[in-house]
Amino acid sequence: MVTDEYAQYRGMTAPPQTAAMPLERDVIRRFVQAIMDDDPIYWSNEAASQSRFATITAPPLYPVHAFRRAPGTPDPLDSIIADPNADGTAGNDTIGFGLPPVVSPFKRLLNGGNEIEFFRSLHLGETAVVTARYADVSVKHGSSGALLLVVVESTFATEAGEMLLVNRQTLIWR
């Protein structure tokens, strides 16, 4: 395998993707229940108004999870009905945020970790926007053979352009 065949992906940037809906109270409620964080700034007007945020806000990592499928769009889990061996991602792996998949012979995926830089939280009523790019795509050789390392850098902001966070995720295919 030649590393240069992946050079076409490095720096490739997807068009901005906008979450299907603005942040709503019930979405925050379900998210904080899932992560088991009962901080009242996520649900109490009084607590939130006295916080540095001054308004109801979502937990810092919420924007990464804000991109659920829009109403009326195909359900990726339907692919399992057609192919019982499908992984339910419909080829998207839910990390590309509009990036085309990297074509490779590798089939097994491992999350190599995330490096996250926070700027601020998403507030009630705001809509998240993400722009993703391939920061690096390269082949490395390990003790078990060749590995494809893909670093996806996703920048999350509000529709007004205020930075929320940058997520650099390393994916390892073998």
Image (cartoon, grey):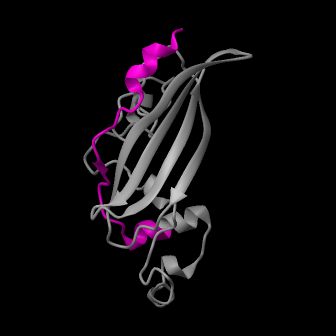
Location of the N terminus (image quadrant) = top right
Q: Answer with left or right where residue 15 lies relative to residue 154.
A: left
Q: Which residues are magenta?
A: 1-29
Residue closest to the eye, 80 or 24: 24
Q: Residue reaching furthest right?
A: 143
Q: Residue 94 in the image: state x and y as whole percent.
A: 44, 40
Residue at image point 55% right, 81% down: 40
Q: Quadrant of residue 106?
A: top right
Residue closest to the eye, 32 or 159: 159
Residue at image point 47% right, 91% down: 46
Q: Is residue 5 above or below residue 135?
A: above
Residue at image point 49% right, 31% down: 136
Q: Is residue 164 magenta?
A: no
Q: Residue 86 in the image: state x and y as whole percent.
A: 48, 26
Residue closest to the eye, 63 or 149: 149
Q: Residue 110 in the image: state x and y as whole percent.
A: 61, 32
Is residue 72 visible to us here? yes
Q: Residue reaching furthest top?
A: 1
Q: Is residue 11 magenta?
A: yes
Q: Answer with left or right where residue 128 lies relative to residue 65.
A: left
Location of the C terminus (image quadrant) = top right
Q: Is residue 96 above or below residue 173?
A: below
Is residue 88 visible to us here? no
Q: Residue 160 in the image: state x and y as whole percent.
A: 27, 65
Residue at image point 56% right, 37% down: 170
Q: Is residue 120 above or below residue 3?
A: below
